[in-house]
Amino acid sequence: MRRADLCAPLTMPRGPALANRMVLAPLTNQQSHADGTLSDDEYRWLMMRAEGGFGLTFTCAAHVQAIGQGFPGQLGCFSDAHLPGLRRIADGIRARGSVSSLQLHHGGSRAVPGIVGRPVSVSDDAESGARGLTLEEVEQVRDDFIAAARRAEVSGFDGVEVHGAHGYLLTQFLSPELNRRTDRYGGSLENRARLIIEIIDGIRAACRPDFQLGLRLSPERFGLRLLEVRDVAAEVLRTRRIDYLDMSLWNAFGEPVDTALRGKSLMAWFTGLDRGNIPLGAAGKIRSARDAARALELGCDFVLIGRAAILKHDFPKQVRLDPDYASPPLPASPEFLAAEGLGPAFIDYMRTWKGFVS
């Protein structure tokens, strides 16, 4: 796979094309104000990446309900009070030549009890202390995801991504271990995936025809079954409900945790799906130009850059200049990270990643 392929434009089923195949992953950065409004530090972090050449710039996961806050300093999209900051982000990303997307999220049982009180989940959960949502509350979650997408649209974003990964609320619905509901949102895989499908269909109906809509899934951990997640992915691709599928794999080149499914990479379980013109992206340990090119060679249409984008705001420009570009070595100094656009709260958060900050 040539480096030039990473730099080639990517046409999307709806909305603007991406200038290249390198996408800023939606990264937790803990820089928003306590009420979910945008801070100058978070704005600077995102604008440096948009200016650094990413074809698509994601925000961090933005919570659609106050009770769904998954981490301190999280961006909010559950209130019209967030609109000025969201408009500022969307306008800034567009002015820097990148496509914009707001990632929509609910922490579920992984919400922060000290912030939200008692968290909610798909069912009562003794480990986290979360209580199960009533049917009416599930319907409200669905409607609040849709309302958040409308806020993104009126703010000027090119699209949104529904966060169905990493053990948060939508993942909790998908899990046959965590989901013990007996109503239409529990039991069969069709029922457990119903909330995701209703959110996607609701956003599509509520927003303009060219509003981009993506879905992030992760195939393992948090009580998930890889083959079930693959079936959900296959269904949203088959029905053309989404404009791109974002698979968060932790290691894009690794094999499944389930030993019975080894013999091919996690990525291969999804690149082999019939997806027509819907692009597929992967995230997970893509830290160099060669890693990114390899992911495309193995069947992805784009790559999501996380740690490498934290370490170098202009990763795409570095890749264009050097086919052997690799991320700077770790640990990184606080001064280096500050120069790359991380504010004090973000640097403190990165200290929780073993070996990242010197």
Image: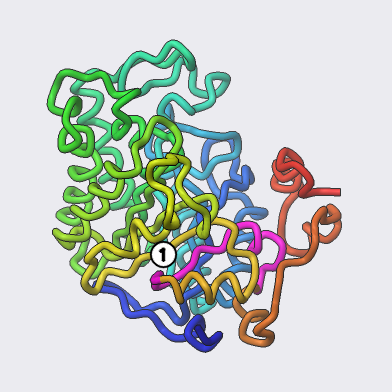
In the depicted structure, whether residue 283 falls above or below residue 33 = below
Report which residue position mark 1 lands on: 281
Residue 154, visible in the rendered structure? no
Q: In this view, does 30 lie to the left or right of 25?
A: right
Residue 315: x %, y % from top left: 64, 73
Depth check: 169 or 285 in front? 285
Depth check: 303 or 47 in front? 303
Residue 218: x %, y % from top left: 41, 46
Q: Is residue 313 magenta?
A: yes
In the depicted structure, whether residue 325 falls above or below residue 194 = below
Residue at 15 percent across and 54 percent down: it is: 205
Q: Colour scheme in the image?
A: rainbow
Q: Is residue 316 left or right of residue 22?
A: right
Q: Is residue 307 left or right of residue 120?
A: right
Q: In this view, does 75 lie to the left or right of 340?
A: left
Residue at 64 percent across and 70 percent down: it is: 288
Residue 142, visible in the rendered structure? yes
Residue 4: x %, y % from top left: 52, 88
Q: Give the range drawn in magenta.
A: 299-314
Depth check: 72 or 238 in front? 238
Q: In which quarter of the image is residue 188?
A: top left
